[in-house]
Amino acid sequence: MEIRSFTDYLRGLDDAALLRLFSHRVDLVTPVPPDIASLAVRATSAPSLARSIDSLNAWQFQVLEACAVANEPFTEKVIVSLTDKSAIFLIPGLIERGLIYPADDGLRMPTTLRELLGNEVAQLGPSSMAKLNLRKLNEAPPSAKKILDAMVWGPPRGTVTDIKKPGAGVQWCLEEGFLIPYSQTIVVMPREVAIALRGGKVHKEQQVNAPEASYTFTTKDRKNINSAAIANVTTFLRWVEEVLNFWAQDPPTALRSGGLGVRDLKALALHIGVDESCAAFVAELCYISAILTIDPDDRILPTTNFDIWLTQRPSDKWLTLTSAWLSTSRVSGLVGNEDSKSVAPLGPELDRVNAASVRSLILSLLRDHRDGAVTPDSMIAIASWHRPSKRIGGINPSHILFTLREAEWLGVTGQGVISDYGLALLDQRSLEQIDIDLPKDVDHILIQSDNTAIAPGPLAQEIAQEMALLADIESRGGATVFRFTDSTIRRALDHGKTGDDITKFLKATSKTPMPQPLEYLIADVAKKHGKLRVGSTTSFIRCEDQSVIVAILSDKKLEGLGFRRIASEVLISDLGVDDAVNVLRNAGYLPALEDSKGVLLTGARIMRSQSKARPPRIVGEIDSPTEFLLEGAIRALRAGEKSSHRQSTLRNISSSALGELPRSSANETLELLSHHLAHSAEKSLSIGYADNNGLISHRIIDPLKLSAGTLLARDHATGEITTFRIARITGVASL
């Protein structure tokens, strides 16, 4: 088969070659093109070529640039002379990707790809239209040599004061054709001159191999790595639970522009004991995992998926979070970054097109260097070689550092080295080892004499939830320290607990005796709780103890409430209920809420979103199809190509048999079709019909129905009932 174009090349590929092409460029089969011609159009489109270029490493990209520099058609020998002898091994890979293709006269490159690479590939200017005597470069005077040396490695453009009076050095170069005048003040060095001065090479340094990795430490013993990783897994799962339980009780409100406000982020970071960047990452991961959502009323709340998530095994919990992290296009590390100060977690500004591919690259590099912790600078250098992406300025080093940090938080790595759990995740193997290695839940606490309690390990789910209600976490680690205070006991009472309930639970759960000061604290708060009631007028306050009423009226800290006494036991305020409660509690009082009937409002205020979870969409990524789907795509493509070829053949036959295309005006066409349907419906017609590209072909048809600017007819070429637009029919003739 004669190969004169990229389409011809694709038509000559067997199924195995197409499979390799699609495995490199999955966008070509999303969706499956109808035929080879359509495949060629898609494969040579700028977006598809750009995506393929971005997947090349530095050495592959240099060889591709050499192909773009070479005059077509070019040979493997030419590319080797412009680069390095090892380039010979890369050319088949570039052919597999459809970035270059073999024609009858040599290797060629799609025109769109040349345009995409730009006019100054490898900092080289355009080819000279004149024949140059490059040997004269050795005879260049010092002034000219200085100018040529300054321009040889780019940029290929230089500025002169006036092209008519350029100076001796520039004048000599212009006369010899070693510089070309571009404008009144700009000169350009031809490509041939630059390559000659570069010693026949396109690039100054041939980046054949990836940079050598530098390690902070190396180890063959993976026990410590996995121990650090499992500790990180435990911690991260606890963070997720704490975040969502925290917001289930007191949900923040999303900003008008979307996302979490700075104040709420700081409160979250303080609550779980991490910095704001880590808190933002935890919140983001909950969001993209659909266990957290933003309600239509802008409240940020856990979803019912969170309740399901809580019942799962730790390995399944971890898999849910890490899978979302691997595929998301959102970059939480941008929160608080100097270059993106206005970016908020859960907001719409966090999407980056290549985020998932960068994450995948870094993890694959960590897998390749599993015997030690690669330094961040070394990892940046290695990643930049694998994905130079010069078209977009290369990988952002910050995104690499974000990925390394997040992998450590998640437990994908431990001490900077990929863990066995991370390897199992990447290889899609069972994660049951996480369930085995995680510390076993403990069912007890150790209450201390200073109103604290120590959990000697991760608490069982039920006990952990109770302790989160009764106490605040003071410190975290292998053992968690809880502290009991007035406010924490009041919080439990607000959620429907009684003093006796609290005491009974602590005595049953603690393996140490209940200290007397803690018993007194619980009894004292329980005695005061609910004596003072707040309800709705705008708000009212009532208390059977008139001395408390008098104390409130005389308390200067409460002057802002504007209390008015309407009865011996009742005060009213213009402030709302929530505001009144908060002010009173900040002033040291212990009010309880009651409803309009005077019934004390208790019970857990654990809220869930009532709307369906709406995780953010993934931007810029295409899922890699399985080999089964790729094989199905090839079969569909072959079938479409056969059908297209058959139709084209039949049309060519009919066109040659019928001779000249019929011509008629729009009114004549409509009149002829109407007359034919009314009087000669059993006969066929010859029509000229323009396709989407404006190409006119002969068609033989049997008209069936005319309506709304369209003609329904049977096409003899395909045997199928087809709809023809009247406006595209160029003429009608009887057979």
Image: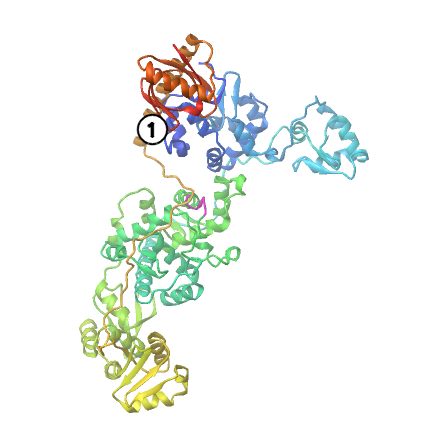
Q: Residue at x 37, y 58 (%)?
A: 283
Image coords of residue 6 (percent x, y): 48, 22
Of 679 and 60, the residue lying toward us: 679
Is the residue 735 above or below the residue 378 in the image?
Answer: above
Please state if 155 lies on the left or on the right of 367 as rendered. Answer: right
- The answer to whether residue 419 of the structure is visible from this angle is no
| Residue 434 position in % (x across, y down) | 27, 52
Say few, some or many: other residues with alpha carbon within 10 Å of mark 1 (under 14 / 14 to 19 / 20 or more). many
**At 49% from the left edge and 51% from the top edge, which residue is drawn?**
398
In front of the other: 513 or 611? 611
- Could you say where residue 200 lies in the image, as x and y percent from the top left? 63, 28
* Looking at the image, residue 313 lies above or below residue 7: below
Image coordinates of residue 310 in percent, x first then y, are: 25, 57
Q: Which residues are magenta?
A: 352-356
Residue that label 1 marks? 633
Could you tell whether 282 is left or right of 213 in the image? left
| Residue 422 placement, left or right of 217 | left
Q: Confirm whether the magenta stretch covers residue 363.
A: no
Please give the count of numbered marks on the rendered protein. Answer: 1
Task: Assign a secondary structure to mark 1.
Answer: helix
Nearer to the camera, 67 or 185:
185
Q: Amino acid under label 1?
A: Ala
Q: Is residue 677 visible?
A: yes
